[in-house]
Amino acid sequence: MSEHLLAFLYFFILLTAFVAIFLDDLLSSFISLSVTGVLMATVFALLRAPDVALTQAIINSGLVTSLFLVAYSRTQRTPPPAGECVECPFWLRWPGAALVSALFAAVLFRGLYVFSGERIPGSTSAHYLSQTLEETGALNVVAAILLDYRAFDTLGETTVIFTAVFGISLLLSGGKYVHSGHGLSFIVKRGMALLTPFILLYAASILFLGHLTPGGGFQGGSVFATAAILICVVYGTNFEAARISPKSKETFEAGGAVLFVFIGLLGIAWGGGFLANLSGPFSAGTPGSLFSGGNMLLLNLAVGMKVGAGLSSIFYTMIKILELEDDSWPS
Amino acid sequence: MAVMSFITVSLLFALGLFTVLSQRNVFKTVIGLTLMESAVLLLLISWAYIPGGSAPILPLQGKGVDPLPHSFTLTAIVIGACDIALAFAFIMKLHRFERSVNVDDFRRLKG
Amino acid sequence: MIFPNYWMLFAILFPMTAAFILQLLHHFAPSKTGGWILLSCGITSLLTFGAAVSASSGVRVLRLGGWGADLGVLLVSDPLSAVFLFISAFGGAAAVWTTFTNISKSGPSAEQWRLCGLFFILWASLNGILTTGDLFNLFIFYEILAVAAYVLTGASKTREALEAGLKYLVLGTVGALLILLATSMLYMGGGILNFALLSSVVGGIPRGALAVAAGFTIAGLGLKMGMVPFHFWLPDAHSSASTGVSMLLSGVVVKASFYSLLRVTTLLFPAEQAGFSIPDTLLVLGLLSLFTGHISAQRQTSIKRMLAWSTVAHMGYLLIGIGCASPLGVAGALLHSFNHAAAKSALFLGAGSFSTLSGSKEWRSFTGFGRRFPREGAAFLLLAASIIGLPPLGGFWGKWMIVLAAMEKGRWMTAVAVELGTALSCVYYVPVLLRLFSPRRSEDTPAAGAFHSGMLFIALGMTPLLLALFYFVPSLYEYLIAAGEWVVSPALYRDAVLGSMIP
């Protein structure tokens, strides 16, 4: 990999981040931030981290940007607050903030600099790379770590999503879907209708082949959520909500979580410990085939259910708040 | 190469911190948080890379990069997205009261 | 004997799953949610208590998925976790019970059951923080805790609550990112994330990196526990939330951060390696928190805000306790965590009930409530006296041990400062008590209502008397000192955990 290319990408990451911060127009900021996300994904791909690149591209530059846009569209009905001092430049306004950040950067770099020598891989990572196939039956080492060696972390992580969805529903409760938004033109709708099966197929493939190729429950689930968001944009706010109600989304989500815990408990029942894979009731199968890697396929399904249903219900909860509560606003 | 990554990470994190500390629009604050998060992700992934290494998908060609930071990063991305979504929920609710997205209007509690 | 090791796993798993099932129940059998909440509350409390008891008799190590310390995640509980698991068992149950009775009194609201679900998730993550043996796992549990705590803070959806929630969210996320940064740096240096293994290779990490990682860890965890100068969010969050949430946040959640700080700093940042003395730093930060908290509390007219500032001050006592870096100091801090958790939860419950009665959060509106509700008034008096630190009560002995530890180390000024803190806290608690027991009845005092959760409050009000026993019953006292010795010598933890790995 060329260092020059990397330097070039780093430079543009910093540049787009800088632009995102200092543009006055928020929409342009979001676009710039999204570009930062895509550049980061490129860097991750160059640095041989395909799983991370996929996740970064789908979640950070796709879903998060769409959330930015939703939140923006829900809060910009009023003119920007008075007293915004646009004339005076930022470096005069907040020298303190600049000083603190500069000091922080210096300290951080000082701490990191000692690691700039030769990189010697640790014994743990060497073990993962050499023993994964034998110990877990999976081909994707990152998936093996996420779903077998350190599956408990993944349970915690899916719980974070669950909590966030739970919390957002609590905070934004009281709204209702309103029959509004007719969506885009007929041509776009037809186009979307043609595309949807392929998007769903793609999502299913990265979900179910997570233990063999880059991807897995998180990425597959997020693509499902992205498909839901796209359908919402193209067909109007009401279309998807009418087909998959929030109730069934939440059921899906909690069902995925319970499935995860249940698979874990099976491991205890077979005497291999919580979330045990091959030392529990599961078999390795033929390496490289769909049914290999023990419980990873099931865990990917559980995580995918949870992430897909969770992220799309975050999006829908955020959309619905809006229309209803306008009336109760203080005028 | 490592030094280059470290410089980028430090600058990106500091840029995010600066945004959180100085900007008055609450959306900018959230942008700052995402930038700080990105900096940490970049640190982990650039550290995992080993010159000449290949992606951690078996069978390996030559030596592989360190897979453990990849799984941490994946986790951190999802968690970060949840934090940001929650921040938006708060902002949207607060906007109903204040009709503003200015951080100064969100600083009524004092003392 | 595998079974005792599983208590801690189920203390995490059960409340988590209870929340998942609560969501399913809400959709398919709404009438059953109330029963399920109560049942889960009881079971979780029992499991947490079981985990605490099993850990208090020795180190428990559980390998998840059957992997060893270097490959997988370990759950470890030891006498130190046991102390905090006891706090979690009682504090969590009290908070869920309070919220649940509140909800059922105000009528079943559409979304209120979600509050209880969040409590269970928060409880699960608390138990996870207290028993995890892995740095990255700790970060994840912190995120669960944080997300649940942000939402609970803002759950009443008043303007103040939302503002406090957003502030908490922004600062909490910065704190979490600092912790993640420190975690990455430790991984870069040590190549491992298990506490015990990392602790044995930490000597090989270059000094500069370790010092920066230590700084980030202290800042990140300090942010989560409301340590000065990272305390801005705490008074807002703890005073704007509803009563049950304040009880949990102020009583138990900050203790979990204190526990992590204690665990991480003693295990991973030995003084000779980090290049600066961590205990001394914590001592200075503790003194700052102590005075900032006590002095700011005096300016408050709102009772909950006053109690929240008092929490900042008490975090200061705890930090001073570990800053003494001796078994006695740590034991004092542990006893004080206990006492503060019980007394502060109960005070928030009492304050919340008085506020509901008078319709105002201002403590000046509580005129004569102590006379109208003599038993509850006496409980409030007892709790306040304990938290001020008056001698026969539990609150005194924890502070006393911290003072003794400071003097043992020759830090006379610190000892004087701790006692000065006691005097300062009298200045703001005594007027509240005088108002509570004043014979005068102001005109705007509303008609007498029922005291909410009176029995629970009275029961909690008795705890300061019980906690005083810790100083006088030799076995309990020795237990605390043994836990203190255990904490200050990380080699013991390391050997116990790694020793259990050998089949």
Image (cartoon, rainbow, N blue to C red):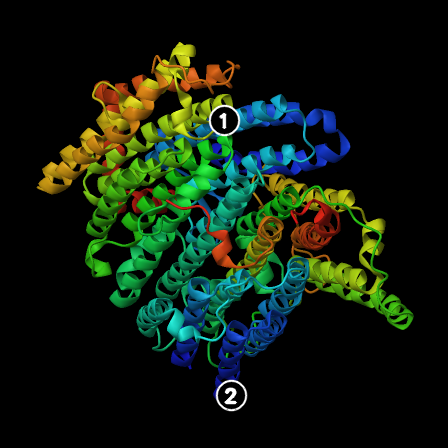
**Above or below, comparing residue A110 to residue C400 in the picture:** below
Quadrant of res A222: bottom right
Q: Callout 1 environment at 10 Å: few (<14), some (14 to 19), or many (20+)? A: many
> Does C366 sit left or right of C295 as displayed?
right
The percent coordinates of residue A148 (x first, y second) are 57, 53
Tag in front: 1 or 2? 1
Q: Position of residue C429 (x, y in %)?
A: 30, 27
x, y percent for residue A234? 82, 65
Q: What amino acid does circle 2 point to? A: Ser
| Percent position of residue A138, x then y | 63, 61
Location of mark 1 (residue):
C93
State whether residue B41 is above or below residue B88: below
Please state which amino acid type lies under the numbered disc 1.
Ala
Residue C266 visible in the displayed image: yes
Give the residue number, with chain letter if any, for mark 2. Answer: A2
Which image quarter is the N terminus of chain B in? bottom left
SS assignment at label 1 = helix
- Label 2's element? loop
- Visible in this render: residue C462? no
Task: Name the image quarter holding residue C16.
Answer: top right
Q: Camera-side residue: C103 or A14?
A: C103
Few, some or many residues within 10 Å of mark 2 (<14, 14–19, 20+): few
